[in-house]
Image (tube, coloured by chain):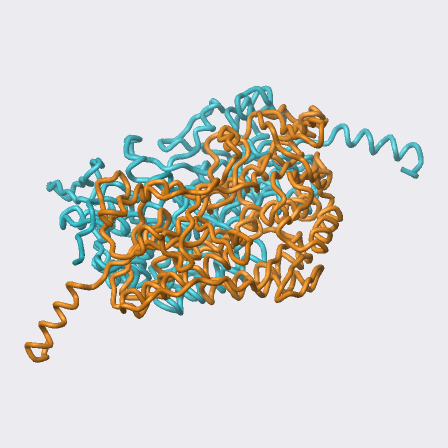
Chain colours: A orange, B cyan
Amino acid sequence: MHGVAGQSISTTAAEIRRPQVVILGAGFGGLEAALNLRKADADVTIIDRRNYHLFQPLLYQVATAALSPGDIASPIRWVLRRQQNVEVLLADVRSIDPIGRTVAVDSGALTIPYDYLVLAPGAAHAYFGHPEWEPRAPGLKTLDDALEMRRRVLLAFEAAERETDPDRQRRLLTFVIVGGGPTGVELAGALAEIARQSLVKDFRRIRPESARIVLLEGSPHVLGTFPDPLRGAARRALERLGVEVRTDSIVVGIDEDCVTYRHGDAQERISAATILWGAGVAASPIAKSLGVPLDRVGRVTPEPTLALAQYPNIFIVGDLCAFVQDGKPLPGVAQVAMQQGTRAGSNILRAIAGQGLEPFRYRDYGIMATIGRGSAVGDVFGLKISGFFAWLFWIFLHIFWLIGFRNRLVVMSEWAWAYFSLQRRVRLITGLRGAATTDAAPPPARR
Amino acid sequence: MHGVAGQSISTTAAEIRRPQVVILGAGFGGLEAALNLRKADADVTIIDRRNYHLFQPLLYQVATAALSPGDIASPIRWVLRRQQNVEVLLADVRSIDPIGRTVAVDSGALTIPYDYLVLAPGAAHAYFGHPEWEPRAPGLKTLDDALEMRRRVLLAFEAAERETDPDRQRRLLTFVIVGGGPTGVELAGALAEIARQSLVKDFRRIRPESARIVLLEGSPHVLGTFPDPLRGAARRALERLGVEVRTDSIVVGIDEDCVTYRHGDAQERISAATILWGAGVAASPIAKSLGVPLDRVGRVTPEPTLALAQYPNIFIVGDLCAFVQDGKPLPGVAQVAMQQGTRAGSNILRAIAGQGLEPFRYRDYGIMATIGRGSAVGDVFGLKISGFFAWLFWIFLHIFWLIGFRNRLVVMSEWAWAYFSLQRRVRLITGLRGAATTDAAPPPARR
């Protein structure tokens, strides 16, 4: 303001030329990219269709009523509130014009120009070409998904309590989880705990601990991306909790009554009221508008720098990014997305400064999964661990990662409480419209 | 089992004759009645359309994103898990047959017989004969209501951030609360705090602190049921927070664009995107099926014992109960419902034992309301208090009341955090379907 005229003019000129960076998606990858651009002399816009950043590795805990949505999610605006060069936009991105360098959001009437684009839209559930299964077997990607799963699980126990027909009651108390990756394994473990421990005293007519929990996995192992001894440990931990683990079992049909799967040459059926989907994911469809080649599951293969060969100002991060390192594709986990986001952010800084881009290299700190209360398996810093200490380590690792110190404290105390009391306090069914359930018969008269 | 034959027979005979008690509603009144029947030699069934007991006095804290649903609600089954003579039924009650002594639930196919009935269904919003206002001006009775209010408030700020037309932006940042009772006053105070403190750093284009918050009350005072000096203190506290308090202002119209109200002879209009309803309540319509006289708002007037004159085995509790004491009608607050529930329970115990019923008498321990962070007004044990110490007292009173020790600890730490950090961590918008908001224009280009 009070500077000499020349200064003032040059500032204005610099402002006019300020590069525009647009980031699609405020998941682990997009957020890291934004945080890495905090010192950039650029305007950053981060666009997400939700107003919160989600700590997805703990989403199954919301689905199984151990944590509240607020424990594992933070408003994006709040996370970025101190970063003055970032603007948050709550909107749905419809398409990208890589030639005109704009993204179209919402109905398409609104376009946002960019100089640099970070694509970190994440992934959606994939139903192996059977989208008709989705209503019967919901997946787990958002808070609303998690609340829907919680509602279905709790309502199944409620309906079973009111049911008099033994076959229908059996069906209501049967839960099938499709997919033996980390999501499916963690869901199955948590469900088994709900049934065998949390709900034991709550019902008068049914015995929740008699619930049948079946985990179906198409390959020969659960946790197929984990090293071999840990796969076996995970399976044994699940079976100790009473989960029926069926590997080499490929789901071929899901209808109102049951799940059908192929096991070798045999076709088998399980009559179940609740089916949860923990299997395949597909990349976000937004990549189609780029006009570049996509792989089998819709992902984009960038250069080693994460930039596209065709459009070096577009960076691909997270689940959308098909990246092969040392001959192996990187898995779709938070750590990969975060490290890619960091690299995309630093490469944009370099591009703005006129420097060459640096290649991305993933540093694997390990993988872990929990199986119910007090048990986990992990391969951390090359060390294979399982059991109670693995679980404790898992907890500290995840709490350490949680964005926002305050959340860490609360989640820690929630877990301590849940662990010692065997209770899941947030067993609330929200989103009920009108009558609770109507597919159960009247309870038997008691006199 | 190993008793003499005579004992064994008499036990069986007693079991056959065990009285059936049905309680409709697991709010404060119904739950107290159930807890009071814990030693009854009777089978108790408590029916609610929701699976949780709600601590309604704190519901506005969920609506304004300070608390999570799990902080103020407990599963009914969990609250009653140790009481073996109680069964919980998740169902919608459709009608009561006081002659045949049954209640019909859900589609009507299921009827439940009773010897004693406690009617504690609570109240619903009343729109002064204008049910068409409800979608525009949602009320606050359930967790889903609170999440809906939170969604609307947060989305209004989001849409304002994207809006370029100053008039439309102004409209998006205008919040009208209808009704100056405790719910309306507490909502207005909390909303003012969100705008002036919690969101201040979150936006780049709008200044959330410039939001306009208007409280409309038809009578000459806010908190009309409070003693006079406290009404004035409440009004001043609201105005200090920047809330426009308009008394003697009767709402006569609500449409897509604005709220119209009559103030004296003048008709005035406020253009507002968000309208929240904190005004009238109406008794549950279930009472109609009793065939007894109802008062103007649909309530039932029982005998002083809370039993009906026509049907002495039916007890009326809580918001459904029109009860005049010392010439004044009792207010529809938690304390009244709880004390009535206790009396209904003990009178059923007496009836089962063949003793005469005792009359109900309300003991007034006081009323309180909070106005934002660190301020409250109250009339407690005959002592009128206001300001910071009233607020501290209010907090301890409410936390002390919260069902479940664990909830107390968590809510206390949430509040301590919110108080010192000015943050509302649970500002999550759930239940978004597809696009976020589409009624806002594109943001201005920044280059």
Q: Decide which of A167, A21 is in the foreground and name it.
A: A21
Q: Decide which of B299, A123 is in the foreground and name it.
A: A123
Q: Residue B3 location, x and y as percent? A: 92, 38
Q: Residue at x 67, y 37 (%)?
A: B355
Q: Is residue B101 left or right of residue B137?
A: right
Of all residues, the one furthest to the left in this rendering is A5
Q: Decide which of B220, A122 is in the foreground and name it.
A: A122
Q: Hey, which quadrant is residue A388 in on the image?
A: bottom right
Q: As displayed, is residue A385 above or below residue B247?
A: below
Q: Is residue A63 left or right of residue A262?
A: left
Quadrant containing the N terminus of chain B is top right
Q: Residue A330 location, x and y as percent? A: 52, 54
Q: As displayed, is residue A304 above or below residue B248?
A: below
Q: Residue A254 location, x and y as percent? A: 58, 28
Quadrant containing the C terminus of chain B is bottom left
Q: Is residue B207 left or right of residue A290?
A: left
Q: As displayed, is residue B287 above or below residue A308?
A: above
